[in-house]
């Protein structure tokens, strides 16, 4: 998900994950690792990005934290 933040002060209150290009994001897990989320704000602060990895209960988790970081970094690289 990408949310247009033009004209809005965009920030994430807490960061806990270093991303490429000196960007910081927020990573979280819920549902015993079946719902992973990575959120960050673009360098020009015009867009808020939110990537979600979801795996149904009872199945092995399809995503890892490293996968979420790789996906975020891939998007950051493409937007450069």
Image (tube, rainbow, N blue to C red):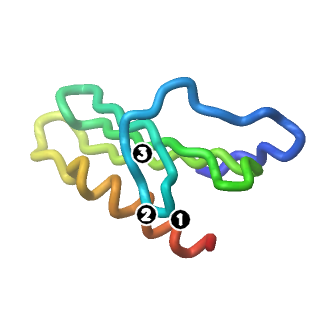
Q: Which residue lies under the disc numbered 2?
A: 73
Q: Is residue 9 left or right of residue 41?
A: right
Instruction: Check disc 1 and report its element: helix, strand or loop.
Output: helix
Labels 1 & 2 near each other (Cβ < 8 A): yes
**Farthest residue, direction right:** 7
Q: Which residue lies under the disc numbered 1?
A: 76
Instruction: Check disc 2 and report its element: helix, strand or loop.
Output: helix
Disc 1 to disc 2, how far (Cα)? Answer: 5 Å
Instruction: Check disc 3 and report its element: helix, strand or loop.
Output: strand
Provide residue 48's location: percent of width, then percent of height.
65, 45
Q: Which residue is drawn at 61% across and 46% down?
A: 41
Q: Nearer the viewer, mark 3 or mark 2?
A: 2
Question: Quick check: 9 above or below 67?
Answer: above
Disc 1 to disc 3, how far (Cα)? Answer: 16 Å
Q: Nearer the viewer, mark 1 or mark 3?
A: 1
In terms of image quadrants, where is residue 54? top left
Residue count near mark 2 (Cα–Cα under 10 Å), binned few <14, some 14–19, many ≥20: some
Disc 3 to disc 2, how far (Cα)? Answer: 14 Å
Provide residue 29's location: percent of width, then percent of height.
29, 32
Residue 52's tag is 3
Provide residue 32's location: percent of width, then percent of height.
18, 28
Provide residue 34's location: percent of width, then percent of height.
23, 37
Q: Tell me how many marks there are.
A: 3
Upstream in sequence: badge 1 or badge 3: 3
Q: Is residue 66 or residue 34 the one in the foreground?
A: 66
Labels 3 & 2 near each other (Cβ < 8 A): no
Q: In this view, does 19 lie to the left or right of 42?
A: left
Q: Residue at x 37, y 42 (%)?
A: 17
In terms of image quadrants, where is residue 74? bottom left
Q: Which residue is drawn at 34% across and 63% down?
A: 70
Question: Quick check: 23 above or below 25?
Answer: below
**Farthest residue, direction front:** 22
């Amino acid at each position: 998900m990408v949310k247009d933040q033009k004209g809005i002060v965009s920030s994430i209150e807490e960061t806990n994950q270093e991303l490429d290009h000196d960007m910081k994001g927020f990573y979280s897990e819920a549902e015993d690792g079946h719902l992973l989320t990575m959120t960050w704000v673009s360098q020009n602060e015009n867009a808020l990005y939110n990537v979600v990895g979801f795996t149904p209960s009872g199945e092995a988790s399809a995503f890892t934290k490293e996968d979420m970081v790789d996906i975020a970094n891939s998007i950051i690289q493409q937007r450069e």
